[in-house]
Amino acid sequence: MSSFDYTSLWERPPVIEEIILKQKENSLIQIDILRLDLIHPMLSGNKIFKLSLFLSDCLQSNHRTLLTFGGALSNHLSATAYACRTLGIKCIGLVRGEILNSPTLKYCQKMGMELHGMERSEFRKISEQTNNDLLISKYGPHTLVPLGGFGKKGAKGAMDIMNLVPENTYSHICTPVGSGTTLAGLLLKSRKETIVAFPAIKNMYDIPKRMLEMGVRSLDKLSVVSNYHFGGFAKRNDELIKFINQFYRDYQIPLDMVYTSKMLFGVIDMIQKGEFPRSSKILCIHTGGLQGNQSLPAGTLCF
Ligand SMILES: *Cc1c(COP(=O)(O)O)cnc(C)c1O
C-alpha cells in the first residue's frame, strides 16, 4: 500500500520500558512507556506515523511538494522538515504568528523548509481550509497536510502505533492529545484496552466529535482526563518543570514540556489517588516532542 518504508527514516526503533514507581504502596500497578521519542530527535514520536501516508502520496505525485501548518515550537513542522529533506520533497510551512526565529523554525529553515509567517487570525482561517484551491493558487501544487495531520489519513497512519503494542498485555493505554489524530489511530485499532486521553489543551470538549470525524465508530473504549493541562496549551509552571527534572532523575527518561510531561504527571497523580483499578497494567505512549524543550532558558532542565 504505502510505497515507501517510513521506518527507513528512523534512527532507532522504539522500545517499551517498565518504570518502577518510587511510591511503593502502588507496586501492584505496572507502568510501561512506549518510547516513540527514541525514533529520532526531530522526527520523533507520533509525527512520523501521522505523516506516513501523506509522504507516500507526495512521493507519488509530480509536484513532490508538501504544504503544512504549525506554531513556532511545532514538533509537526520539525518532523515534516526532516522527513521531506531526507526524502527529497520540497516543503512549505505556514506558521502561526510572524516570528520565525525560534529554535524549531530555524531548524526547519536549515532543512530547506520554506516558511511563511502569518498573523494569527489569517492563520486560523487558512489552516481550516478543507479545499486547497486557494492554497494552490498562492503556493503552487502540493500535497496538503492539515493542521496536526488531523483527518482520516493521519489517523490511519497513527494506527500503526498499535502494531508496537503487544496484545493481551495492557488494561490501559495513555496518550497525550493535541489534534486527537493519534488518539483516533489508537482507538481505531484498540483491542480490549481502555484508551486514556490527556488533552494538552484546556476545555477541549470536542474530542468525541473529532473521533467520529476520523472514523472511530465506538467511544466505549475512550476515557478523557481533562484536568492536567496546567493552565492551557504549552503553559507551564515550576511544579511541571520540577516534575520533568525529577522524572528524569528517577527513570532517565526525558519528557517534553507540552505533552508527555503533563500526561505522566496525570498518570502518577491518578495512581496516587487510587483512580486506576488495582493491578492495572498501564502503557503510556511517549509521543516525543523533545525538540520543543530547546526554547526553554538554558539550565531549566537537567538533561
Ligand atoms: C503533536 C504531538 C502530540 C499530539 O498529537 P495529536 O495526534 O495531534 O493529538 C502529542 N505529543 C507530542 C509530543 C506531539 O508532538
Image (tube, rainbow, N blue to C red):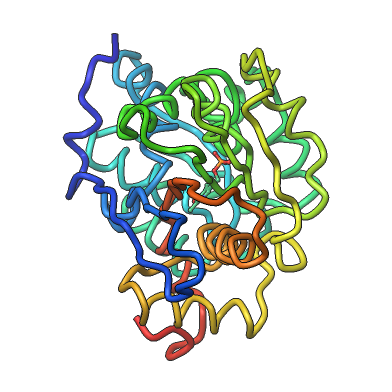
* Vertical arrangement, residue 180 with respect to residue 20, above or below: above
Is 147 positioned to the left or the right of 140 in the image?
right
Q: Which of 10 and 129 is in front in this view?
A: 10
Is 43 positioned to the left or the right of 123 in the image?
left
Total of numbered circles in the picture? 0
User: Seen from this angle, which residue lies furthest bottom?
Assistant: 299
Q: How far across and how far down the image is residue 142, in percent? A: 47, 23
Q: How far across and how far down the image is residue 172, in percent? A: 51, 40
Is 11 positioned to the left or the right of 271 in the image?
left
Looking at the rendered image, the quarter that the C terminus falls into is bottom left
Is 271 positioned to the left or the right of 134 in the image?
left
Q: Nearer the viewer, residue 168 or 211?
A: 168
* Vertical arrangement, residue 117 with respect to residue 236, above or below: above
Looking at the rendered image, the quarter that the N terminus falls into is top left
Q: Residue at x 62, y 66 (%)?
A: 269
Q: In which quarter of the image is residue 258?
A: bottom right
Q: Which residue is drawn at 62% across and 19% down?
A: 214
